[in-house]
Amino acid sequence: MEVTDIRSKEEGKIWHRKPTAGKGVLVTVSRTAHQAKTVRFLHVAFDTTGDSFLAGDHHGNIYVFEISRNRFRLVQKTGQACTALAFSLRRTTEFLVALSDYTIKCFDKDTKQLVSWMRGHDGAVSSISVHSSGRYAITTSSDTAQLWDLDTFQRKRKLNIRQSVGIQKVFFLPLSNTILSCFSDDSIFAWESDTLFCKYQLPVPDCGPKISYKAFAVTRDSKSLVAGGRSNLLHLWCLDSKQLIRVIQMPTQVRTVRQLEFLPDSFDGGASQTLGVLSQDGIMRFINIHTCKLLFHMGSHENAITAVAVSPNGRYVVAIMDNGSINIYSVHNLTQELNKPPPSKLGVVVGGEADQDLSNLKVKVSSEVVQRPAKFSGMRAAKILRPPPWSVADDKENELPAGLNKKRLVALLKAFGEYPAKYRMFVWRSLFCLPENHAAYSSLTDKGLHSAYTTLHDKYPIKNHKLQRGLQRVLSALAHWAAIFGEVEYLPLVAFPFVKLFPNNPMVCFEVVATVIVNWCQHWFEYFPNPPLNILSMVENVLAHHDKEVLQHLVDCGITSQLYVWPLLETLFSEVLTRDEWLRLFDNIFSNHPSFLIMACVAYITCCREPLLLCSQKQDFEYFFHHRNNLDTGAMIKEAYRLMSSTPSDIHPKTMLADFTPLTKGQYPVFNHYPEFIVEYQSQEREKIRLQEMEYLRERQEVSALRADFVRRQAEEEAYYTQQELLQKAKEQRRNILAQEEEKLTEQRAKLVAMKRELKVKELQLLDTTRRRFLKHQQDLRASQIKRLDQEISRKMDLRERETAAAVQDLEIRQMELEAQKRRLEQHLLQEQERVGRKVEEEVEMRMRKAEKEGEERKESYELLHSTETKMQALEESLAEACQLGLESDWQREVAERLQQVDAEHERKRERLAKLHRQTLAKEERLADIQRDVAGRKWDEVMSARAQLQEQRQPLSSADTDVQRQMRMRSPDCLRGLPYKPAAYDSSNSAGPAVKPPVATTLRQAEPKMVCLNGSSPPESTSTNFSLDRGRAQLDRSERELLKEIRELRQKLAARAIEGSSASSQSFHTLSSVSQ
């Protein structure tokens, strides 16, 4: 077994040595990447011919393997692993690939171009089924199946199912418009592909274990379906009756069926009987579904199979092995049970002598035809069948491959006139005894295309490129086999009919053509390059013997055999007969002696004698023998048989032509029945002509190049002068244009200057407007700021006025409280005065009584008492004034404290103002200094006033001490009966502390709770009245003056604050405008 490692090659041979006959595995194909790592093949798919297949590997590379040509090549690099392949499209060069990204792509294997890209699946595509016409395809994934039109690559239908039920497989039935869908619940439905109408559902056995179908296979005639799954049982349905007809049990080694494939047979009419079953052990067993007999198997436990593909012609099986390689099997080498022709329907009676008993007659019949012995009547003699004249040795000579017999075939042909179309090619191959020399044919094809047929399409254009390539291939192989076939001009006409008959098997086509040339074209090339005159003479002799009138008419018209015989022979009647007529004729030609072809030419002429006798012009004869005519082919064949049997032996072509000789096996025979010197000379002359032609072509190319160079130079020169003239004209034109453009430019410049002037004026106006607008905006902004500052100042002034009014109200309330307190104190003082007056009166009365007793002493001391009372009155007035001054000093102290609180509040506000206006800190500091100076002066004034009050209090305290001392020395009786004289208090004497302090001090010491004395004693009292109204007026005046000074000071402070804030705002706006 040969192993081929394709590595990273893009093309090459599949095998380098011809596979040995008898071995099942033709070749093993593997692919290794870097570091000898094996790249696994995943899927394979055959084309419709069965001679080529696709293979996709794990890296996304798609290869095409052509088994008949022993070639492989890389056709696509998808870059990702494939999940399914299809190679049976209507356009034979295109194929479908399902990739791991859930998409399906269509590529062309020849151009390697992407044809289309189909999307729609949400899961990996597990299978692709193509309709027999190649126009439609069904792609199946686990959740959906989609029907595609391969002409437009558009989705036509989509099969949606429930999530609980998965799809196993959806596929077309062969040669039918029916779609089979198989689901995971083992249900199988059949649908009409056009309407998607459900035609039927196949019954599934209820009893027994559940199989869980995984694999399916259908015969080519779409009449039988086999399904298998997780069991060793196979279910066989008949799709015509829709019934389960058989359950096949596989051997116990089979536990799960992975894949099922029918093996096609050439003679079963599509009703395949051989089924391949791939099980879980990697072995594929082929069985007969009718006899349940195991025929053969592929694979083993060591070399297991994972997937297989069977060619449509049943010749090859491609298996993907467990190690990732590909094994190509030959079915013919695996078993001899397939591709056997059916038994003949013709019964031939074989017997001995005439007197032999009828019971000893042996009749060979097929299973379909039963022949019974004839019945005898009582009076009539039985007709005894005599054996044929040929002997047993002749029977052996007439035996053909595959169990056929030439004599029987000829008898069948005479009975029906032709072979069955279904078995015609098989019969021909059997008649020709083709050796099928693969190695020899490969050696011929490896030489490539022959030089004589490189331009075949120019002389014989064929629309079908496949036929064109096949014809070139066959002709090149013939030319490599024998040199003369590269020189024969009519060889394409001879080979073309057979190329059309064997388009998919070039080796068989080559061997058929070679067999025809060796046997039916004998002596054709002896007069090369002239037509075979000896063969033409044979035809004339036979025609002269059987129809002298026609021959004489042809001679009279000057028509030779080269005109009426050679066109029929060089085209093998393909120009004058239809396909069916030609096949029928050559069924008889290939079944008889090679001379039958010559007799067929004579029969064609004699059967057409009437129209030929009417022709007289050479053109009419040429047209007649190169075009189809109204001819009965059956009559012509009968005429040929008549000519074969009635022609004398002296002119019979059979005596001149040898019997049929098949091609030799292993190597093709040497063909040298031609004048070699002529062919060699012609080859040499052809080679010489070819060389001369090449030299001529080279010289012609050089001359053409020189001429082209000359023409180019001449054209360049003419173009140069023309260009110079055009340049001169263009220069003049450009000068004129430039002059015009300069004038236009001058005008435009003037306009531009005017426009610039206007634009400048407009710009200045706009700038002025903008400046005014900006100034207005600045003015509005400043006005709004000033307004806002005025509002702020007015708000602060209002706040300060309210605070001042509140302070004044507080002072007035305090004053009212003081007045009320004064009234209470005055009332209390009056009460005390009354009490003291009563006590004094009592004491005076007591003293007066004592004084009465001491009358003389009173008279003596009267003057002293009078002076003492005067002094006491003065002292009382001084005491009242001192009390009033004390009240004034207390009030001033309270006012000073209130002012201090107001100043502290102002100081806090100034600090907040300083925080808000950091840029005016210096001016605010100066203002604060001024305020502190004024406050300091005020405080100095207050302190000086306090000092003066203290100085005034000291003499008063000394005077009070003296008065108290004198009052202790005096007797209370001396005061009794003295009149009370109120003394007026002069405001001018307020500064005299020498008179007032004693009385005031005495009164303070006597009554500590008394604050002021204002009023007179009761009218019934004789004590002295004290008045402090003048001190109160002075205190009011001083209070008003102090409040006035405070208001002026506040106004000055407010004015300075406003000036400072306005200056700071102006500086801020100046800075902002500069920054802008």
Image (cartoon, rainbow, N blue to C red):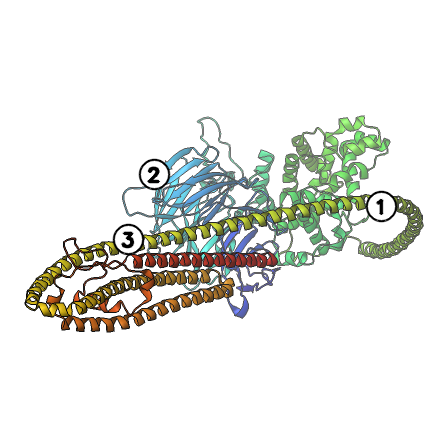
Q: Is residue 860 visible?
A: yes
Disc 3 vs disc 2: which is toward the camera? 3
Q: Earlier in the sequence, mark 3 or mark 2?
A: 2
| 876 to the left or right of 693 | left
Drawn side of residue 1054 relative to residue 689, left or right: left
Residue located beneath label 1 in the image: 745
Residue 810 position by quadrant: bottom left
Q: Nearer the viewer, residue 503 or 741?
A: 741
For image coordinates 80% across by 27% down, the residue present is: 613
The residue that label 2 is drawn on is: 203
Badge 3 crowding class, 10 Å Cα cut-off, few under 14, some 14 to 19, many 20 or more, is few
Label located before the other in sequence (3 or 1): 1
370 vs 611: above or below: below
Task: State the image coordinates of residue 963 (x, y, percent, origin top left).
Answer: 20, 71
Which is closer to the viewer, label 3 or label 1?
3
Residue that mark 3 sits on = 813
User: Circle 1: is it few (<14), some (14-19), or many (20+) Cα within 10 Å?
Assistant: some
